[in-house]
Amino acid sequence: MAQDYNSDLAELKLAHVEARNYPRFRWLVLLSMFLVTIVSDIIMISPAPLMGVIAESLNMSLGDATGYIMGVFNLVVAVSCVASGIVCDRWGLMPVLVYCSLALTLPTIALPYFGHDFQGILLIRIIQATGCGAVLATVSPVAAIWFPRKDRGIVTGIQQMAVSSGIATGFVIAPALYSVTGEWRTAMAWQAAICLPAVAVTLIVAMMPKPPVPVSAGDTYEKSHSGKEIFNAATRQPATWVGVFICFCLMWILNAYNDLTPAYLAIEPPLGLGFGPLAAGKMMMLLEIASVAGSLATAFVMVRVFKGKVRPVIGIGFSMFAVFTISIMFPFVHSTAKIIAVCLIIAGFFRAWVIPNALAFVAMHYPPHITGKIVGMWIGLGIFGSSAGVICGAIALRQTGNYQLSFILVSAMSLIGLVFTFFLKKPRTFVRQSQSQTTAAEPEFDQKLPTAKIVR
């Protein structure tokens, strides 16, 4: 208890040490990441509400179409996220963000021309997935390198708000464009218009002269250790691997739920509830709007209510999502659209409490210049869970002929994630170093810290 208290006190002192001027350029970096994240999630989720139409056009079963178009996408996202974390730490944030914006935009434009057979569609989805995975690796580096420690939870909350906004937009815009064009490939291609502002902003920020990056008093562990030594030290911390398992469970439930629920709401009974693609998209938009609100609320809850402790917030997120995920299967819930909407709103609000706090944990407790690798490892390996979730949900749907088992699996994985949350503790190697650096810096609270020569 005394050790935990001293650690928390050291971090409060450290936050005071870091009350200095960071360059305003950081807001442009954050804007670029925000826009690219929105675009990536629109592209990722937009096939979900149209999956019945897509499966019919490809002469495939609904389960097989979901497994290939969404499951393979998530698998590639995982590989891309791991690789991009390494690239981000070695060559900087902006090259990764530029690649993301182009990899999401150009294949989307090409879909009506090269998407008339299954192989062409799959290739386009794979290229899009590399861009979607790469942007996931940038959030903790943006927070840890460009923002003071006290604001890093807010940055990850803003990124999660972008995720939820993108998914909400994708759920609505894809059916709306399909209702206008009458052809799903054309509807998907028109989404490139949304991608263009992200491309423009990212290219402008990448070409601008960049100020030097501030060096944090608590992040100087890396001064006396090589990058390889720091990363090896991180892999020996239990928190690193607990985070991987938490992200595995989280990605399972997020992607399986997002892929299964729109079709369940849209498809005619007895397999689904029969609301149709447009109404299903609107319901899912409510879930994502609630996730936006949850993303904004979670930073306040973590900082103000739980004093910077992420475990209680993540635990609440997992437990509430587990309950309200399974609730839409009950007859008294899905008997009316209003009750379904309430359950979706509550599920969306609390599921947004998990990932921002997990990424804030990385940004607050790991040296900045390995945060890309750590996040890449957490989300990259965790996204294998999303692929497993989508594929297992599709298999359960095909074997049982209904959605019950698929939703039970989602709820069960949420509870497993809750169990792992109890073991997420600060990596002691870096905590001890932060304490020593804070002690050394205490007499100079009003002194500005030097800036690094590294330009990110």
Image (spheres, helix red, strand yellow):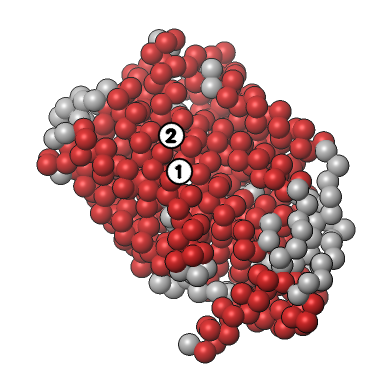
Vertical placement of 243 versus 327: above or below?
below
Residue appearing at x 70%, y 45% in the figure: 27
Q: Is residue 411 left or right of residue 25?
A: left
- Write down the quadrant of residue 275 in the picture: top left
In the picture of the structure, the residue carrying the numbered disc 1 is: 292
Q: Is residue 361 visible?
A: yes
- Image location (x, y in percent) of residue 17: 72, 72
In the picture of the structure, the residue carrying the numbered disc 2 is: 168
- Image location (x, y in percent) of residue 72: 47, 38
Instruction: Count numbered badges in the picture.
Output: 2
Residue sticking out furthest to the bottom: 2
- Write down the quadrant of residue 284 in the picture: top left
What distance separates the C-alpha of mark 2 from that of mark 1?
A: 9 Å
- Closer to the camera in the image, 273 or 297: 297
Residue appearing at x 58%, y 85% in the figure: 6
Residue sticking out furthest to the front: 446
**Residue depth check, mark 2 versus mark 1: number of the one nearer the observer:** 1
How crowded pointer 1 is (Cα within 10 Å; few <14, some 14-19, many 20+) is rated as: many
